[in-house]
Image (cartoon, rainbow, N blue to C red):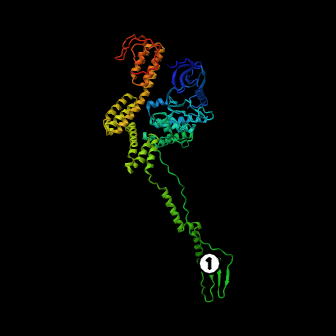
Amino acid sequence: MSAPLPTRIGPYEVLHILGTGGMGQVYLGQHSETGQQVAIKVLSTGLAHQSGFVDRFRREVEAMEKFTHPGIVRLYDSGIDHDFPWFAMEYIEGETLLARLRRERRLPWRTAFDYAAQICRALKAAHDHGVIHRDLKPSNLLVDRLGHLRLTDFGVAQLFDAERLTLTGGVIGTAEYMSPEQAEGKRATKQSDLYSVGILLYVMITGRPPFQGKSTVDVLHKQRFGLYDKARVVVPELPPRVDDTINRLLEKEPQKRFPDAYVLLRHIEQVLQRKAPDLREGLTLGEEREDVPVGSTTIIPAAHDSSTTYDGPRSGRTIGDNGETSVDSDDSGHAPDGPGMGTLMKGLMRAELESQNRQHPILEWISSGPVLALLLGGLLWGMWRLWPRTPSEEELFARGQHLMEQGEGLNYLQARREAFEPLLARNPKRWSSSVKPLLDEIEIYEVTRKAKLGPRKKSLDEHNPTLYDSEPRRLIHWATALRKEGNLIRSRQILTDLRNVLAADPEQPELRQLTERLLKELEADLGESARQFVCHGLDRVRTLRTGGDEHQAWLVLRSLFELYQQDPACRILITGCRRELWPDSRPEELELNVWPEKLPCSLPEGVTPNSPGKTLPPAEKTDGPDDTADPQN
């Protein structure tokens, strides 16, 4: 039975309940003096007497007391009322981001980036105060009527300087939005919150988380080691710069992500400001140099203060002030033969050029023949060592197995392309028996992925078989679409009929396996949905019985049994509720799961119950109901 609504918590009058969280209930309250409306969070009854959860609740209060940022829900008051801790915080009129995503499924990338920018501003304020949120997800983000986001629910937040409340190796958070280091049990950092921002961006843009699994352990394993379909694979029109931002946030190693929320905020703002498609900007290698004209070399002879006279036996040579050589003629008037000034300058220029062109001794040694041959041999040996060699058959098979052990994803296709297909092409007789089951598993994954994505940019039309390469694939896609819309019963009916048809067709084994696999997943979804509905209905039965409307309570309980008597788990819950609320029921009715139309207490002896072919004998006196009997149909 659901807990009664309190009338007053501290100085606040309780108006109605807003919702239920992981650690308690949230009520809408109004201050008795000021009339201010607030949201009041109260630790649930089952957790109020457990010291670990009380400490975590207290830590949430301490974290919220630090903030006055417009992007974080403000804390107004806190206290303890009848041994139940509570705190009052700002009431936001709007909805959670989760509610909007359920309604619209996908958001435009600019809207998603605007939300991410608001989250970064709130995270910067939290990180500056030494608080890491550790549980960013759509249900913890409130959107007001103006489209402004508020960050809330610091129930698992971590203070930098506070003592940890969990042991080393503990995992805290939501699996689909948890960073790889959190999934491994390591201490969360600022980059852990940024990884969650990347998950939020992926979910807002594509409509689904990057990592999904059948269990929490499966999701955590994929967060640490799995590959994911990039956002552009799901949304082909997404700009590359947006896709690169998401991929950097989802790096497995924290140091490869953005360093902090402020850097990520500036990056997002730059992306939002860009209106034209991304262009590659050229890299400036250097500046142009002005050409230096090369003039002719001018030789200026040295000047002398006086002339020098050489007296020979018959003649004399004089170098005058103009730099020219004059030869005194002899008496006969002939000049003697000898080298002139031009010949001397030519020799000097040749010697200078030879000096400049002469190499360093080390360069001369390297240029010698033996050294060049040795260097060439070393180069060829290095190229031979680094040249990609053909892997062995065992190495190919081991690589394919390693890729498939990482879980479903693009690594399946990589294993088929790079390992299994080359292996079969090389030696099909040896590897066919080992590789064929793995290829079948990859084929089932690929068909499942294509069926879930469906034809792009075309609406679903179950009467248009031209969109698919075969009729079974059209039916599979139709059933998958109905499952996404919530019509689980119709989806199961289509898949069940298709499985029966394919069971007699030996030419399509992969489609039969795919149909059986989708049916198993659908049965799991149906079981979880049914149990939630039954639990909600049983709470209603207890409320009616406590309120005195016993006849209506019996009618609801009996109807739940008629609906879910084929589900063992639901049947146990329903019969258990009957034992709890009507302990005086006849033992024969409990053993045979007989549900009369009238109340058990007013059922006369010998009356035939609602089950066909069953008539109860007169009740025998017993010490009490048989609580150990297993309910059977």
Q: Nearer the viewer, residue 287 or 324?
A: 287
Q: Amino acid at mark 1?
A: Glu
**Of the pair 451 and 275, the residue shown nearer to us:** 451
Residue shown at 67%/75% (left/top)?
A: 304
Is residue 487 visible in the rendered image? The answer is no
Q: Tag 1's secondary structure?
A: loop
Residue that badge 1 annotates: 324
Whether residue 576 sits left or right of residue 37 in the image: it is: left
Mark 1: few/some/many CA within 10 Å (<14, 14-19, 20+): few
x%, y% of residue 339?
60, 81
Q: Residue 303 in the image: x percent, y percent?
A: 66, 74
Q: Picture quarter containing residue 168?
A: top right
**Residue 365 % position (x, y):** 57, 67
- Name the residue located 61 percent from the left edge and 85 percent from the top edge: 336
Please tell me in which quadrant of the rendered image residue 491 appears.
Answer: top left
Name the quadrant containing residue 191: top right
